Amino acid sequence: MPSETNTPSRRARRSDARLNRERLVAVARDAFTEHGQNASLIDIARRAGVGSGTLYRHFPTRAGLLVEVYKRGIQALAELAERLREKGPPLEALTTWLEAFDEYTTTSRGLKGLLATVDDEPCDDVDAWWRATLLPAATRLVEDAQRCGAVRRDVTTLQVLRLVNAVALAHEQAGLDDQRAGPLLDVVVDGLRHTDEDGDPT
Amino acid sequence: MPSETNTPSRRARRSDARLNRERLVAVARDAFTEHGQNASLIDIARRAGVGSGTLYRHFPTRAGLLVEVYKRGIQALAELAERLREKGPPLEALTTWLEAFDEYTTTSRGLKGLLATVDDEPCDDVDAWWRATLLPAATRLVEDAQRCGAVRRDVTTLQVLRLVNAVALAHEQAGLDDQRAGPLLDVVVDGLRHTDEDGDPT
DNA sequence: ACCTGAACACCGTTCAAGT
DNA sequence: ACCTGAACACCGTTCAAGT
């Protein structure tokens, strides 16, 4: 197999590329945390010690880089949703999960910006990826809670996520990055709960 | 009075400046509507037919220009708050006002961005201006509703405004600029209402 | 007093040239 | 196959020079 014996240089190149990629992601994580989702890409490349072209080769779009940075966290949230669903009553599961979601997005500045730009339907493959990861798990939680009458039925899962994300975003933009949104999140969660007191008697 | 007779040229100059200023504001209104609060300033100057220095002379900061564009609307909202307060029951007044607030910010793209950056305390005179206009009126509405037990007491007026603004912002960033936030706003309003069902029995 | 526009520093993105 | 960095187009902001 010459394709294996005569390509130690290929292997070496590849490990170089892999190293660059890892460095970029690590630097990007810091940059997004420090400056939000609009952190300077050229600065990320500089701090990673690579040319700007290299950054674009690995991550053609900013969203792609953002997703790479927050990939693990998004996956962890999806898994948490499944665990909570098996464990407790629907409303409690949803509430706990939304708090975890809020906590993660609060500490991950760039992620808030990424989620905020979500449209009603997937627009590219990066968008499609995180939707496929996060939405199904969240939808199951929301629909469980709706089915048992604990949560109002006139909201979609995407709207719920947008709402919680907006709260986190509002909190961040107010300059209070460090702590969770707390009472503001409570307002949203209370608002999501189904109440009968509005039943129109006509 | 020589200071009056020998300054017809001064009068002419001033009217030039006034015209430039008006043009800038008119163009800026369109630009913010079209591109949001980050619309290109250089493009605004260009479209108004003035040099970039002229824009900076009239409006040293972007926030100053934004406030100028939305000044009337902010004042109108403050007056509406007073009228509603005199007219109906506290909760209804607050609800109606928040809907009007949401509707105005929804149609005024740049305003959402301006309000989103509000800190817990005024940071400059532009910030101070709209706070002095909007906050007192809104605070009276909120506190009325809290006093009569219709709205929970663990939120401040600023938090309420941030929350509603965040909803409008989330809605816009999701690419649905045209319609009001609707159900998302309902969730927030419901969440603000005071309910006793959570009274801890300990 | 007011306006202009060149000048500077910065960024996003692409692409020819290198290894 | 991968990387570099110059090149281009754009913007925010300032300031000397004009009227």
Image (cartoon, coloured by chain):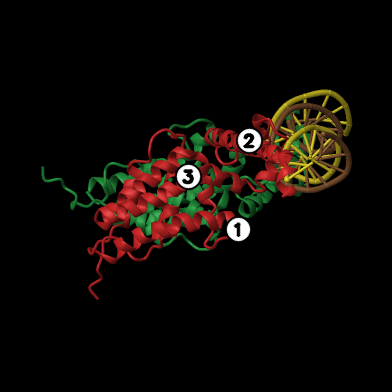
Chain colours: A green, B red, C yellow, D brown
**Which residue sits furthest bottom?**
B202
Q: Compared to B137, does A139 lie above or below?
A: above
- Nearer-N-terminus badge (2/3): 2
**Which residue sits furthest front?**
B1
Residue B59: x %, y % from top left: 65, 45
Taking the spot 56% from the left edge, 55% from the top edge, the residue there is B127
Between circles 2 and 3, the one closer to the viewer is 2
Q: What residue did someone put label 1 on? A: B124
Between circles 1 and 2, the one closer to the viewer is 2
Residue B90: which numbered mark, if any? none
Q: Amino acid at mark 1?
A: Asp
- Name the element at disc 3: helix
Residue B72: which numbered mark, if any? 3
Q: What residue did someone put label 2 on? A: B19
Q: CA distance from mark 2 to mark 3?
A: 19 Å
Quick one: quadrant of the N terminus of chain A?
top right
